[in-house]
Image (spheres, grey):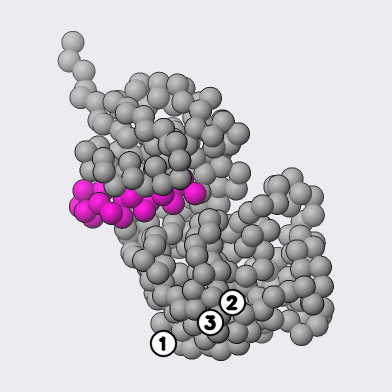
Amino acid sequence: MLTEKKQSLMLVINPTAGKNQARDNLFPLTNYFFTHNYHVTVFPTQAKGDACNYVAEYATQYDALVCVGGDGTLNEVVTGLMMCPADKRPRLGYIPGGSTNDFANTLGISSVMEEAAEQFCSGKPFCCDIGKFNGRYFTYVAAFGLFTEVSYETPQPLKNALGHAAYLLEGAKSLTSIKSYALKVRCDEEEINGKFIYGQLSNSTSIGGILNITRTGVQLDDGLFEVILIHMPENLLELNDIVASLMSQKLAECKYIFFRRAKSVTVQADSPLPWTLDGEAGGSFTYSQAEIIPGAVTFNLDLPGNKPEI
């Protein structure tokens, strides 16, 4: 009896992701892909940078690529893909196994690993924009300032218990504890100067499990960043206004929040400004340049209309 030729699949897995959940699900995932017409080769990561190196060297030899891990592992996989010729990049699947999984939430990918595998196998191609920041790639966010560290280090149950507004205020404690940065920022042709306590260039609806901008019209394939800059508040009333605007997602209506969409962004600081890229340390710079690369990576997704409903 003739059987359909299996496609080749490169499975890059971070075994320690999700408190070893990824490792414990390795056989069920491999078996699922095998029974759905894929010949699987497993690439377990051993150290930081492995996922990027594996993908850069071997991905063009495969029909499909699936990443199992957190946002940091996905960042490495996407970085490796961007090192491959654009016309030879395999379609990408993501099975989230981290603690935050911001980008999976944006894409509507299930937190149940086998369900995420099913979404990949039954999905269709969706071309997604990717960011480039000072020569490095990021999948969904480059950020600086208040909450960038605490949002990734605080356990999710505590975030849920505090709620968004209380959590943000807890992070601030008082105005005297908030650090501001004097910046000159250019978004395409528009320039803004001032002191800011937080900023992000994103292509996502969820940032650090805290900030949610679902209702701001985010599109992952429009060739534009969502740019958010929060001015330094002068008093607690202004801080409360900022928090209320973040909670209601009415960013454009708050005079203390700068919200735009842009293809390219430059940030000039008086002193080295520390950044995070996809939740990982991204370096400190007095001058930063970011641009968006339209449709750079093709995800396989099983979503209504084959496009994230965000």
N-term mark: 3 or 1? 1
Q: What is the three-letter code of the residue carrying label 2?
A: Leu
Can you say whether 262 is above or below 234 in the image? above
N-term mark: 1 or 2? 1
The secondary structure that most of the magenta stretch takes on is helix
Secondary structure beneath label 3: strand
Q: What is the three-letter code of the residue carrying label 3?
A: Ala
Secondary structure beneath label 2: strand
At horizontal 30% and vertical 38% (from top left) the residue drawn is 64
Apparent side of residue 209 relative to residue 136 in the rendered image (left or right): right
Residue that badge 1 annotates? 189
Residue that badge 3 annotates? 269
At horizontal 17% and vertical 15% (from top left) the residue drawn is 2
Can you say whether 79 is above or below 267 in the image? above
Q: Which stretch appears magenta?
A: 72-91
Of residue 268 and residue 193, the one placed in the foreground of this image is 268
- Residue 77 belongs to magenta span: yes
Residue 229, disc: 2
